[in-house]
Amino acid sequence: MSDRTLVLIKPDAVERRLVGEIISRLERKGLSIIAADFRKLDRDTAERHYAEHAGKSFFPELVDFITRSPLLALVVEGPTGTWQVVRNVMGATDPAQAAPGTIRGDLSCKLTENLIHGSDSSSSAKREIALFFPQLAD
């Protein structure tokens, strides 16, 4: 049985030319990229994507960051629980807490610019895939 999740290679990773490294880590884990879209995210989509953070003090900064320059949106496919596999490869949200060997543990040192987003549940994956890749929505 296969499963899908959304991954965003954030603007800081694109700016630092880490896209290939990040994709390579996902593929070496055995995951497949089944859709990709390189784009500059508009504010409306960013606000819908981060809707659970609306009203929090960091929300405006988060939206400004994710819309500042292009990102790469991916749909990643793998076995059941793919979202959990991706989250493990990414590492903890705070790079200072991320284990060595993870994307954030090896390549990031700033909480507000932590290179990558991955869906945090199956339901989030479905919602986020529908937002970024409506043609792949269940």
Image: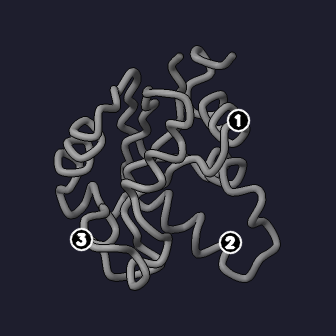
| Viewer-side label of 1, 3 | 3
Residue 123 falls left or right of residue 70: right
Position in image of residue 114 (x %, y %): 40, 69
Label disc, if present, on residue 127 of the rendered structure: 1
Instruction: Tell me the quadrant of the picture where the C terminus can be found.
Output: top right
Q: CA distance from mark 2 to mark 3?
A: 26 Å
Position in image of residue 123 (x %, y %): 73, 38
Placement of 110 over or under 120, stated as above or below: below
Quickly name the residue at label 3. Answer: 106
Label 1 sits on what residue type?
A: Arg
| Viewer-side label of 2, 1 | 1
Callouts 2 and 1 close, C-beta under 8 Å = no
> Label 3's element?
helix
Label disc, if present, on residue 79 of the rendered structure: none
Position in image of residue 102 (x %, y %): 31, 63
* Nearer to me, 107 or 46: 107
Label 2 sits on what residue type?
A: Phe
> Label 1's element?
helix
The colour scheme used here is: one colour
Are there few (<14), some (14-19), or many (20+) residues within 10 Å of tag 3? some
Q: Going 82% across and 72% down the picture, which residue do you hit?
A: 55
Q: Going 66% across and 79% down the picture, which residue do you hit?
A: 58
| Residue 63 location, quadrant | bottom right
Q: Going 32% across and 81% down the picture, which residue do you hit?
A: 109
Position in image of residue 33 (x %, y %): 34, 27
Instruction: Compare marks 1 and 3 and give the one earlier in the sequence.
Output: 3
* Nearer to me, 79 or 106: 79
Label 3 sits on what residue type?
A: Asp
Q: Going 66% across and 45% down the picture, which residue do you hit?
A: 121
Residue 56 falls left or right of residue 3: right
Instruction: Compare marks 2 and 3 and give the one earlier in the sequence.
Output: 2
